Image (cartoon, rainbow, N blue to C red):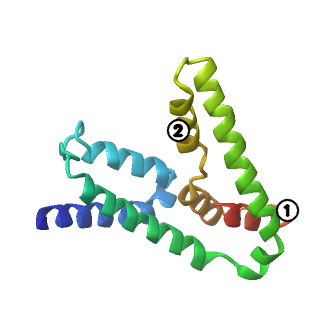
Amino acid sequence: MALYILIAAVIIIICLTVSKFSSKIGVPVLLAFIFLGMLFGCDGIFKIQFDNFSFAETICSTSLIFIMFYGGFGTNWKKAKKVAAKSVLLSTLGVVLTAGITGLFCCFVLKFDLLESMLIGAVISSTDAASVFSILRSKRLNLKHNTASLLEVES
């Protein structure tokens, strides 16, 4: 177990280092994280096997907590209150419509069972909050009409 924690700590330190240098070298940080995942994965150079599912779930849940806190602490709440209703509507309708359309596509075009199709749609439909926060904050986009706040709250 201690080896798993050490490996996770090394990966997190590498990710933090890569995120600091990614803007300087012009590589999107999400692309760098995908590369690191491939590098450390079971088919990569380090051949880390992911057979301990409970530990992997713990690491993923902890990472998700950090992502959500990062987004929450960095959000300008004065601007977010103005767009809260629109954001909730956008996130709910967006996820439901994307899940439904994807599920129907998988069912009728790819010939999966209806329940499997809807499961695929549900998995694909959610917004990746980490990527939205990363793009909005790293590029400092000057979006009009509180669009940046709308996207942050929606994510």
Quadrant position of residue 140: bottom right
For this view, does 109 lie left or right of residue 97? left
> Could you tell me residue 128's position as x and y percent?
56, 53
Disc on res. 119: 2
Quickly name the residue at label 1. Answer: 144
Q: Residue placed at 71% from the left, 56% from the top? A: 91
Residue type at the position of mark 2: Leu
Query: 112 or 77, which is in the foreground?
Result: 112
Report which quarter residue 98 is drawn in: top right
- Up the image or down, 83 lies above or below 78; here it is above
- Quadrant that contains the N terminus: bottom left
Q: Is residue 2 visible?
A: yes
User: In the image, is 101 to the left or to the right of 65?
Assistant: right
Q: Nearer the viewer, residue 22 or 1?
A: 1
> Label 2: few (<14), some or many (≥20) within 10 Å?
some
Q: Dot 2 lies on which element? A: helix
